[in-house]
Image: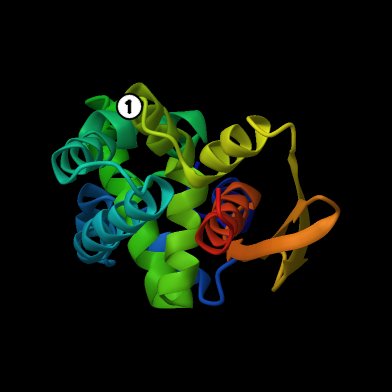
C-alpha cells in the first residue's frame, strides 16, 4: 500500500488526527530506501524530531498522571514506553506497516515488519503532527497512541492516579464522585473538559486530550481544594 489518498485517510483515522498538509504524512511514511529510488524526502528528519517530542510528551503524561511516582520509577517507565519494542507494537496494532513506502530491496528483505522501521514510523508521524499542528496536537496523538502502554506501566508499580485516590477517599466516607464531560475543538483534535461532581455539586474541573486525562485533572483539582 502506497501513500495515496485512501492510505492517508486510513492513517489519519488510526492516529486520530487530520493533517492540514498531507505531504507531511506522506513523507513520514517514506523509508530511506524508497526515497533514494524515487528522489524524494524520507522520514528521517521527522523521526529525529518525533523522537524528542515523544520523550517530552511521555514525560509530561507520567508526571501529571501519578503525582507520587518517584523519579527513578518515572525514568524506567519512560524508557520502557519509548523503546523500539513498544513503539513497534503500537505500529502493528494500528496497522501502520501496511502504509510504509519501502524500496524494492527493503520490501523483499522483510522491512515492512522490521521493528526498527515500525518504531521509526511512529516517531516520524509524531514529528509530522508537531510540524503540522503544533505541540498540543502532537501530545494528543501521543496520548491516543501510547496512553494504554503508559497506564499499564504505571499500574504495574501500584502507583495511583488522582482519580483513583479521590474515589478511594470519598468511598471511606460513603460518598462518590461522578464525572461529566464536554468536548470542544475539531473532531480530529478534540479537547475534553471534565467536571467532578461530589454531593451533586461541581467540586472541580480539568481538561485533557482524552476523557481519562480530563477526569484525572478534575480529580486533582478536587483533591487540592477539599479536605480529603
Write the residue at 39% across / 44% down.
100
Looking at this view, name the residue that lies furthest to the right.
200
Q: How many numbered circles are shown?
A: 1
State whether residue 73 appears in this view.
yes
Which of the 4 image quadrants contains residue 197?
bottom right
* In this rendering, position of residue 188 left or right of residue 183: left
- Tell me if mark 1 has few (under 14), some (14-19) or many (20+) residues whose alpha carbon lies within 10 angstroms of its own: some
Looking at this view, name the residue that lies furthest to the left.
72
State whether residue 112 appears in this view.
no
Q: Where residue 195 appears, x then y in whole percent?
A: 73, 60
Residue 149 versus residue 213: which sits nearer the camera?
A: 213
* In this rendering, position of residue 174 left or right of residue 71: right
165 versus 7 height, above or below: above
Q: Where residue 11 appears, x then y in whole percent?
A: 55, 49
Residue 186 versus residue 46: which sits nearer the camera?
A: 186
User: What colouring does the structure picture have?
Assistant: rainbow
* In this rendering, position of residue 93 left or right of residue 57: right
Residue 59 versus residue 85: which sits nearer the camera?
A: 59
190 versus 213 height, above or below: below
Q: Pointer 1: what residue?
A: 113
Q: Where residue 125 appears, x then y in whole percent?
A: 39, 57
Write the residue at 40% across / 27% down.
155
* In this rendering, position of residue 93 left or right of residue 168: left
SS under mark 1: helix
Residue 51 versus residue 190: which sits nearer the camera?
A: 190
Q: Where residue 162 appears, x then y in whole percent?
A: 50, 46
Amino acid at each position: 500500500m502506497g501513500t495515496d489518498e485512501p492510505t492517508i485517510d486510513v492513517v489519519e483515522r488510526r492516529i486520530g488526527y487530520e493533517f492540514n498538509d498531507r505531504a507531511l504524512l506522506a513523507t513520514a511514511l517514506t523509508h530511506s530506501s524508497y526515497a533514494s529510488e524515487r528522489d524524494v524526502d524520507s522520514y528521517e528528519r521527522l523521526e529525529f524530531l518525533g523522537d524528542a517530542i515523544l520523550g517530552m510528551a511521555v514525560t509530561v503524561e507520567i508526571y501529571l498522571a501519578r503525582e507520587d511516582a518517584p523519579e527513578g520509577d518515572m525514568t524506567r517507565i519512560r524508557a520502557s514506553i519509548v523503546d523500539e519494542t513498544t513503539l513497534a507494537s503500537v505500529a502493528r496494532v494500528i496497522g501502520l506497516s501496511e502504509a510504509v513506502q519501502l524500496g524494492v530491496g527493503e520490501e523483499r528483505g522483510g522491512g515492512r515488519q522490521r521493528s526498527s522501521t515500525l518504531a521509526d514510523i511512529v516517531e516520524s508521524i509524531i514529528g509530522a503532527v508537531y510540524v503540522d499542528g503544533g505541540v498540543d496536537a502532537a501530545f494528543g496523538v501521543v496520548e491516543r497512541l501510547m496512553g494504554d502502554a503508559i497506564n499499564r506501566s504505571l499500574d504495574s508499580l501500584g502507583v495511583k492516579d488522582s482519580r483513583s485516590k479521590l474515589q478511594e477517599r470519598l468511598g471511606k466516607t460513603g460518598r462518590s464522585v461522578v464525572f461529566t464531560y464536554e468536548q470542544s475543538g475539531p473532531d480530529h483534535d478534540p479537547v475534553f473538559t471534565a467536571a467532578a461532581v461530589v454531593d451533586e455539586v461541581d467540586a472541580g474541573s480539568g481538561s485533557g486530550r482524552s476523557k481519562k486525562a480530563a477526569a484525572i485533572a478534575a480529580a486533582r483539582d478536587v483533591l487540592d481544594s477539599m479536605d480529603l
